[in-house]
Image: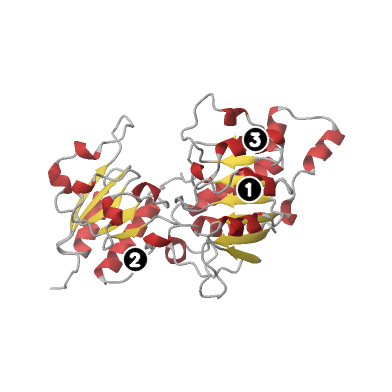
Amino acid sequence: METCALSKDKLCLFFPKEPDHRWIDKICKRYPGLQVNWVASVKSDGKLINEKELSAEYWEGTTLLFADFIPPPADLLSKVRFVQLASAGANIWHDHPVYLRKETIFSNASGVYSPQIAEWVIGTWILSQRQLLRYQTRPSQDPAENTRQSTLGYGSRSRMGILGYGSIGRQCARIADALGMEVYAYTRSDRKTSESRKDNTYLQYCVPNTGDPEGRIPSKWFSGTSLENVNAFLAQDLDILVISLPLTKDTENIISHGQFEILRKKRTFVSNVARGKHINTDALVAALESGHIRGAALDVTDPEPLPKEHPLWKAPNVFITPHISWMAENVWGGSIQLLEANLERLNNNEPCINHLVKELQSIG
């Protein structure tokens, strides 16, 4: 009988998708002895299920976990040795006892949502630069006015700076490169060698013709952990700044009054698809109202959700969506594909895809 390293494991899936019994049967046949529990984390009325609403038997003996965006209580996960996150960011887990346990392997969903998020970044950038909403709501019949407005788009002459060159940043770079834009990348660690610039996330292994596998697209790379390093990057006459890095204590408010003053020179457009707390909201409102930046596209805000009376809603040239850039048809299919790939790696005692090096979770 074929041996199976997962024969004594129990896998629990808890995320917003109804159980796929065909998938469960396939996995159980592939790994004899593996137990699989799957519960949708959303009720039929759309409300989230509290983890404690599930019986203790559901969690008992769990060793492998596919987790939704809210971490289950630590006392339910005392035996967990592997956690597959449903999100690219792990910030809500940082103080969780299971995350702090050194022997517990964490894998994030970096790359799973990158194609659709990059579409959102490029789409909102074009929407802004080409003034498409303006023409839709109040089209002008004045040829001179139309000509003036059309010159706002920079097209192939634009320079994109990507703060956090992970899977999202690499997919943004791929599309920007196809549009003829110049790309500058910023990462936490130095990437001077060709080997260090390679991607080792979900996109490379599972989704062909996406991202920047070899790290060849950026014409310039910047790196460092200090604000001075970041400021030097921001001073590169960027037409658009894409924020796509993890949220940590080091990256909170990484874009504030001083940084907007630097971006003022080129009136850089700011696109944030990471976390709202990366940007000081008061500084952002001031930069928009003063015209120091030409606009912003925000899929995330601080606070989130943004209160109805918040001044950011009334700021000029801002496009806001409620943290939905990652959504797409069959959005969870990639997460299941990643989980399946990592189960095979766990069974073979191989490194997992998207393995989080916890102490290095900072800039890209």
Q: How far apart in space, not on screen, are marks 2 and 3 (Cα)?
A: 44 Å
Earlier-in-chain disc, 3 versus 1: 1
What amino acid does circle 1 point to?
Gln
Q: Please, what secondary structure does the residue beneath circle 1 have?
A: helix
**Disc 1: CA contacts within 10 A as few (<14), some (14-19) or many (>=20):** some
Percent coordinates x, y for residue 172 in the rendering: 58, 55
Disc sitting over residue 352 in the figure: 2
Q: Is residue 287 left or right of residue 80?
A: right
* Residue 138, visible in the rendered structure: yes
Percent coordinates x, y for residue 125 in the rendering: 64, 45
Earlier-in-chain disc, 2 versus 1: 1
Q: Is residue 74 left or right of residue 265?
A: left
Percent coordinates x, y for residue 82 in the rendering: 27, 59
Q: Is residue 350 left or right of residue 361?
A: left
- Residue sitting nearer the eye, 76 or 321: 76
Percent coordinates x, y for residue 230 in the rendering: 60, 56
Disc sitting over residue 259 in the figure: 1
Earlier-in-chain disc, 2 versus 3: 3
